[in-house]
């Protein structure tokens, strides 16, 4: 019997592959970064060939590092940067254009028009999403309207649209599979999360041919297998989930009311609401958390913060005040507070609960006494405070007050940030022993589908705690910090004017 599950974790800045054993422990990890393209202000693109090349190569590396053969892999699970949009030729696989990344704001004006027409209400009711350039649907419309020849080819059925998971499955299967799962479909702005199908009214409004779209499958099911010459033997392809849903599953937030926050390029807070989708009136998203084959769809409330870890990258690459991202903790720890400095990292606008595509990054409260340490501290504060904004909205919509928050992602290893997060929330922050929860969630979904793990109760028993961060900030200090943050967000709001 095969002893491992291979998780492919295709992220915004890098592709990763992790082998997990039956105990849910990572035994081999490989990672490669790939280039980011910024052709115009507010535009973000990836080369689809870079995505596939790096993901394929790290999968081989993860196996080779431990001398593990493909025959010892029970299944492959995929998790991916969501909303990033690709269209390619069904016969040749040739992309018609670069991948338009979830961060890209080029369709903000189209979203404004949909809102002006009142169509955003229909989108909200059907998809659970707000009408924002973040999502895939308007990106598809842009490609159809702006890349020469693409619309005619799409209407003839020659082209395939997909999010990154769909593209990877197409590559892995040698072009045999053009599918996505319910979690990724629920992020396209085109999928009715209650009817369980692509929505005809929205497709008509955006003028998107149904023939372009992938088939939608459960998150845990056997879809097919890899072409044998890719890894040596065919491996079942058995799990898919968008990165944040995968992390929620990897954190085994299996019961309604459990929540997690993932700190990556952005930060994403998800609250399990069970078999009921809860409509938000606070600017949050109602989304599909996952579906196991033969079982009901599970829903979640989600708040998306666009820029968190990327703000630390900016300190490194833009300002040059740190040489590597982990250095931010030591630098920020060298001062007791940000000394009244606030940084709103709205480089591509503000996500939940503000949804302001025209906000921009703002640094306020500077004095002659301000140092790079204060700016570093303000950056960590901003990551935690943006997540607090989401949690407050989530509590309002759901009526659920969290007793603890589970955390994961790269920045969850920053002890100072986790302490700040506990302080501004006023609830304990729990970091698990295995923080590779995004990849682990994909592995769990794939493993369940092929019987590698017998049931979800087994997964829940594997979750172990590394450390709990208890809040220790005085209430009065917390209130001052939050009030200053709210004033800083007001300064950043609506900065770009047409």
Image (cartoon, grey):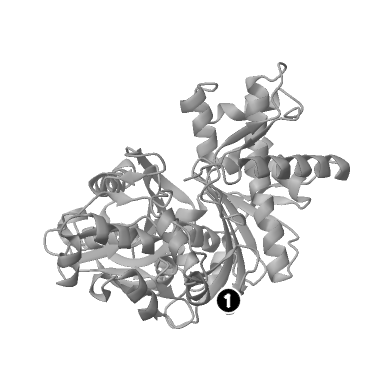
| Camera-nearest residue between 325 and 25 | 325
Query: Which image quarter holds the N terminus?
Result: bottom left
Residue 417 in view (yes/no) = no
Q: Which residue is mark 1?
A: 277
| Camera-nearest residue between 398 and 367 | 367
Establish if 178 lies above or below 477.
Answer: below
Residue at the extreme left:
92
Kindly state the secondary structure of the residue where label 1 is placed: loop
Q: Is residue 353 left or right of residue 242?
A: right
Q: Number of numbered discs present? A: 1
Q: Residue at x 16, y 66 (%)?
A: 152
Q: Position of residue 11 (x, y in %)?
A: 40, 48
Q: Position of residue 170 (x, y in %)?
A: 23, 62
| Camera-nearest residue between 464 and 405 | 405
Q: Residue at x 51, y 73 (%)?
A: 455
Q: Position of residue 132 (x, y in %)?
A: 47, 59
Q: Residue at x 72, y 45 (%)?
A: 486
């Amino acid at each position: 019997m095969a002893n491992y599950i291979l998780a492919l974790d295709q992220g915004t800045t890098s592709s990763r592959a992790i082998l997990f054993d039956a105990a849910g422990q990572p035994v081999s990890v490989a990672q490669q970064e790939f280039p980011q393209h910024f052709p115009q202000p507010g535009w973000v693109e990836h080369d689809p060939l870079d995505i596939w090349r790096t993901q394929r190569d790290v999968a081989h590396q993860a196996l080779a590092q431990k001398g593990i053969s493909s025959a010892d892999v029970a299944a492959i699970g995929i998790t991916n940067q969501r909303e990033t949009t690709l269209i390619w030729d069904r016969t040749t696989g040739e992309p018609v254009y670069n991948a338009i990344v979830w961060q890209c704001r080029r369709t903000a004006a189209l979203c404004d028009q949909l809102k002006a027409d009142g169509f955003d209400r229909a989108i909200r009711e059907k998809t659970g999403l707000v009408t924002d350039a973040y999502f895939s649907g308007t990106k598809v419309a842009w490609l159809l309207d702006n890349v020469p020849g693409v619309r005619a080819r799409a209407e003839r059925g020659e082209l395939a649209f997909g999010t990154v998971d769909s593209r990877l499955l197409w590559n892995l299967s040698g072009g045999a599979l053009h599918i996505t799962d319910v979690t990724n479909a629920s992020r396209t702005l085109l999928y009715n999360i209650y009817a369980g199908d692509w929505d005809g009214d929205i497709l008509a409004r955006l003028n998107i041919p149904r023939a372009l779209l992938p088939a939608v499958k459960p998150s845990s099911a056997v879809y097919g297998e890899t072409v044998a010459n890719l890894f040596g033997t065919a491996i079942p392809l058995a799990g898919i989930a968008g990165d944040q849903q995968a992390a929620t599953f990897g954190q085994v937030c299996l019961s309604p009311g459990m929540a997690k926050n993932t700190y990556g390029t952005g930060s994403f807070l998800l609250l399990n609401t069970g078999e009921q989708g809860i409509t938000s009136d606070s600017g949050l998203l109602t989304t599909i958390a996952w579906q196991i084959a033969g079982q009901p769809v599970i829903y979640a409330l989600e708040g998306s913060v666009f820029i968190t870890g990327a703000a630390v990258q900016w300190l490194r690459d833009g300002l040059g005040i740190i040489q590597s991202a982990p250095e931010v903790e030591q630098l920020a720890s060298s001062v007791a507070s940000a000394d009244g400095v606030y940084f709103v990292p709205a480089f591509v606008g503000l996500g939940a609960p503000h949804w302001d595509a025209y906000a921009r990054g703002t640094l306020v409260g500077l004095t002659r006494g301000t140092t790079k340490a204060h700016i570093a501290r303000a950056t960590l504060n901003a990551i935690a405070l943006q997540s607090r904004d989401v949690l407050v909205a989530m509590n309002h919509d759901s009526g659920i007050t969290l007793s603890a928050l589970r955390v994961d992602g790269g920045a969850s290893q920053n002890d100072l940030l986790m302490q700040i997060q506990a302080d501004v929330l006023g609830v304990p922050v729990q970091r698990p022993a295995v923080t590779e929860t995004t990849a682990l969630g994909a592995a769990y979904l794939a493993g369940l589908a092929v019987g590698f793990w017998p049931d979800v109760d087994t997964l829940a028993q594997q979750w172990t705690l590394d450390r709990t961060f208890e809040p220790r900030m005085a209430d009065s200090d917390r209130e001052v910090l939050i009030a200053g943050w709210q004033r800083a967000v007001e300064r950043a709001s609506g900065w770009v004017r047409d």
